[in-house]
Amino acid sequence: MNTVIIIFILIALIFLVIFRIHQLITEDLRLKSVLLDISSDSIFLHDLNGKLIYVNEAAYKSRGYTKDELLNISVPALDVSNPEKLVGNLRKEGIGFYASVHYRKDGSKIPIEVYSKLIQLNGRKYILSSVRDVSERKKLDFAKEEFIGSVSHEIRTPLSIIKEGVSQILDGLQGDLDEGNKHVLNIVYKSVQRIADVINNIVSIAAIESGQTKLDLDFFDIVSLLNEVEKHFVAKIYNKGIELKNNIADGPIKIRADREKIAVVISNFIDNAIKFTELGFIGVVLTDKTDAIEISISDSGRGMENEDMDNLFNKFVQFKRLIGPGGKGTGLGLVISKALIELHGGKIKVDSQANKGSTFTFSIPK
C-alpha cells in the first residue's frame, strides 16, 4: 500500500513539474511575443520556401493586413527582391542584409532594409528577419539632395564668373600687372578654386550616399590612365622638390571599370601624398595580379598616429594639421575614393607611421 501511495505521489510530482515547466515556457514565449510586438521594426519568421510562421504587430499593421491575412501570404508575394538569392546567401553566410521594397495590401510600396539570420528550431531551418521602413529617411535624403543641388548651383555660377574674371586679369587681357598685384590675384584664384573643389566634393558625397552614383563600366588600359594622371602632378611635385618614384607593371593591362572614377581615386591619393610631403619622395606602384590590379601610392611625409587611423575615412576629418604652410584639404577626398573603390567591388588599405610616411593601396577586380 505504501508503495502505491509513493508511486502516486511521484507521478503527481512529475505532473506538477511538467505543468510548471509548461507555465514557464508559455510565460517566456508570451514575454518574447510582447517584446517583438512593441518593436517598431517589422519581424518576420519564415521557412526556406518563404512560408510565414510568425509576424509581429508592426509587420501586419504597417502593411494594412490582419495578422491571419499576412500569415497566409508568402514572402515572395511581399518582397520585390529575389528571395531565392537571399536564401542561397544565408546558407553560406548565416546572416544577411539587403535593401528592397515591400508591397502593402493596397498595392503601394514601402522602401525597406532587411537584416536576416538563418536559425534552427526543432531541427528545422528558418529565416528570422528584422525589416525597417526607411520611407522617412528616403524623403530626407531627397530633400537633402535638392538642397545641396540648389545651393551648389547658386554658388558655382558666381564662382565661375569670379574665376574667369581673375584669370583674364592674370593673363594680361585687362592690362599689365605688377608682381604685387599678380601675387594677390593668384591667391584669390587658388581660393576660388578651393571653394569650387569643396562644393564638387560635397555634391559627390551626397550622390554616393543617396545611391545615385552609377558606374560607366568599360574596358581600358590602367597603365595608360596611371601615366596620364601622373602627368598632371609633375609640375607640382617638381615645385616641391620631391622625387617621383615609379614601379609600374608593363602595359597594356586591361581592366573593366569606370575610367573617370578610377582617375579621381588615383588623383586624390597622389594629391594627398604631395600635400603632406615636404621632403623625400612620392611612390607609385602598379601590380598586375591574376584577377585584380593593385595600385599603391606611398610617400615619405608626416604620416599619421595610430589613433587617427580609425577616423581616416570619416567626412571633414583632418589630423593634427600643422599651423602655417603645408597640406590643407576638406577631408572629403579619401571618403570619396573609398566609396568609389567599394562601388567597383574593390578594397582599400592604409599603412602609416608618424613622421615616416603613408601608403594607400587599393585593388579592383579586372
Image (spheres, grey):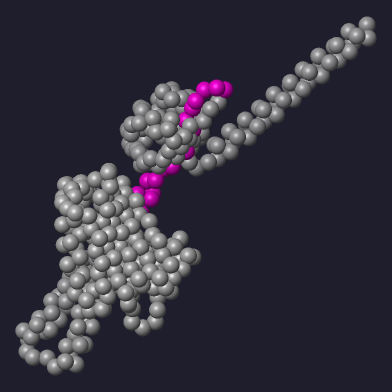
- The quadrant in which the C terminus is found is top left
Residue shown at 24%/74% (left/top)?
A: 237
* Relative depth, front residue between 102 and 209: 209
Residue 60 spot, x, y in % from top left:
46, 32
2 and 141: which is toward the camera: 2
Q: Where residue 53 sits: x, y (%)?
A: 49, 25
Q: Residue furthest right?
A: 2
Q: How many marks?
A: 0
Q: Is residue 132 magenta?
A: yes
Q: What x and y, as percent, mark residue 240?
A: 26, 78
Q: Position of residue 161 (x, y in %)?
A: 15, 75
Q: Residue at x 84, y 16 (%)?
A: 10
Position of residue 191 in the picture relative to residue 165 (left or right): right
Residue 194: tell me if it is visible: no
Residue at 43% x, 25% y is: 48
If the image is split into quadrants, where does the N terminus sit? top right
Image quadrant assignment for residue 182: bottom left
Height in image: 335 above or below 32? below
Between 177 and 58, the residue placed more toward the observer is: 177
**Image check: 3 left or right of 303?**
right
| Residue 141: in magenta span | yes
User: What residue do we see at 49% from left, 65% from top?
Assistant: 307
Q: Image quarter for residue 110?
A: top left
Q: Is residue 8 above or below residue 346?
A: above
Q: Which residues are magenta?
A: 122-142
**Is 218 displayed left or right of 126 in the figure?**
left
**Does residue 173 appear left or right of residue 33 in this picture?**
left
